Amino acid sequence: MFDIGIIGAGPAGYAAAIRASQYGLKVILFEKNQIGGTCLNRGCIPTKAILHSCRLFSEFKNAEKFGINAQNISFNFEKIWERQKTVSEKIRKSLTNLIKSYEITIIEEKAEIKSEHIIKTQSGEFEVKNIIIASGSKPNIIKFEGNYDKDFVLSSDDILNINQLPSSILIVGSGAIGIEWTRIFSALGVKVYLTEMQDRIIPAADFEVSERVSRLLKKSRTDFYTSTTIIRIDNKTVTLSNGKTIEPDCILLGAGRLPDIDFGYFSENLEIKKYINTDCGFKTNIENIFAIGDVNGQSMLAHSAMKQAEDVIEYILEGNCPKFNRDIVPSVIYGTPEIASIGKTEQELINANIKYKKSLFPVSALGKAYADGNIEGFIKILASEDEILGAHIISEEASAMIEQIAIAMNNKITPEKLSNVIFAHPTYSEGVLESILALDKKAIHLPKQ
């Protein structure tokens, strides 16, 4: 008998397996597709590999202003797409060896929950004391009215397997998936149309982030339409709810993801609405079955999944509810510039009638930004007198700066204490200090107000 059987070897599943093994538990890990899950094979990693190629291409095209002569710059689409697969393959091999180093049994087959203590695959049945469901998520597939080829509408999984670059594309949804793919295709010279059913771009973001990203999309010559959906598709003619018709080479669905709850007939015994319901320790309504990561819907991010993985093992061993706080989970949209956020948006504070003060420090006021030629963006801080309530950043290195805010929020470091930290110069991180100082109109590199 195994102490723990884990269904899914994405960030939640493999992290839980390793942490359980570190505590001396006997673990079996099931994966129906590829070790590493969506993040490694069809999401986080391959898209970042492509974005890096796009960044290099853009930088070379603009190298002359930095004194670098680079003529006739071009790219090889096939090599860019092949590289993202190679990167994922290498990391997957390394990750598999890492998991095996902890003497974890890996079964690369589809797993079903037969009973509270039995997990079944085509190889047989495995008895376990506890089950952790970490089956992740799948693309949200939308079907449209009309007549069109099934290959015309692609998911975020499908797009990684295209064999030629489209000349135009319609991207549905302006969340992280939609924005990152918009940046990829725009950088490669593809004409991009972007639709968003809400009334602004990145609707979950702070409104000033949405406004700035809208400006960036206009600069990249992306045609975007808010409060807009697809009404009908006839062959390659797409009719939008705003009355416009366009004829893209293909459509990419970037409108979020859904939990993957295809893990057997026993699932009817679990409390499932859209996601699997869990308590504070990620326990389902069944005593020894737990659900972590995307499948419980608490925070559909890889780093959240890994934190939940650590917490659920400690809960199984000690019974104490972990302190997973979704309000201090950072999120990042990659590309140039990066877009990062944590905590409350200004709208949420207003709606909750919470008193706050805010700062909006322009990246263009940073010497490092000017030296690098990356002056687009801002650092926005929302705070009370004794705590940081939220932060929203558009900038080069935003993914690193948001972690500095995350550390402060997680440890309840007050704005005043953070303002006493000495930040190296010249760095982008100075912007964090300046934005904290700006809460009380004490920023050094802003004009007198």
Image (cartoon, rainbow, N blue to C red):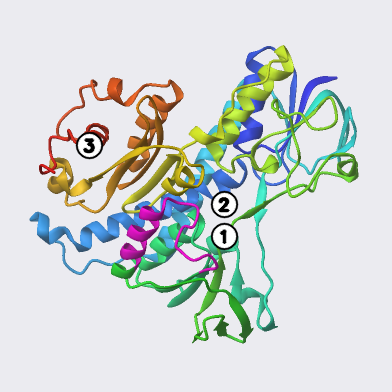
Residue pointed to by mark 3 = 438
Expressed as whole percent of the image width and height from the top left, the position of residue 424 reads 18, 27
The magenta stretch is 196-217
Expressed as whole percent of the image width and height from the top left, the position of residue 382 reads 36, 38
Name which residue lies at 78% across and 48% down: 273
For the residue marked with disc 2, what is the amino acid?
Arg
Q: Secondary structure at mark 1?
A: loop
Q: Real-space Cα distance between discs 2 and 3?
A: 41 Å
Q: Is residue 388 above or below residue 55?
A: above
Chain-order first, disc 2 or disc 3? 2
Residue pointed to by mark 2 = 42
Indicate which label's residue lies in the foreground, 1 or 3.
3
Expressed as whole percent of the image width and height from the top left, the position of residue 413 reads 37, 21
Chain-order first, disc 2 or disc 1? 2
Q: Is residue 138 magenta?
A: no
Q: Secondary structure at mark 3?
A: helix
Q: Which mark is residue 366?
A: none
For the residue marked with disc 3, what is the amino acid?
Ala
Indicate which label's residue lies in the foreground, 2 or 3.
3
Is there a contact, CB below 8 Å, between mark 2 and mark 1? yes
Horizontal relation, residue 273 to residue 423: left or right: right
Name which residue lies at 27% across and 32% down: 436
Q: Real-space Cα distance between discs 2 and 1?
A: 8 Å
Give the quarter of the image for residue 289.
Answer: top right
Q: Which mark is residue 156?
A: 1
Q: Is residue 69 above or below residue 5?
A: below
Is there a contact, CB below 8 Å, between mark 2 and mark 3? no
Q: Secondary structure at mark 2?
A: helix
For the residue marked with disc 1, what is the amino acid?
Ser
Q: Is residue 210 magenta?
A: yes
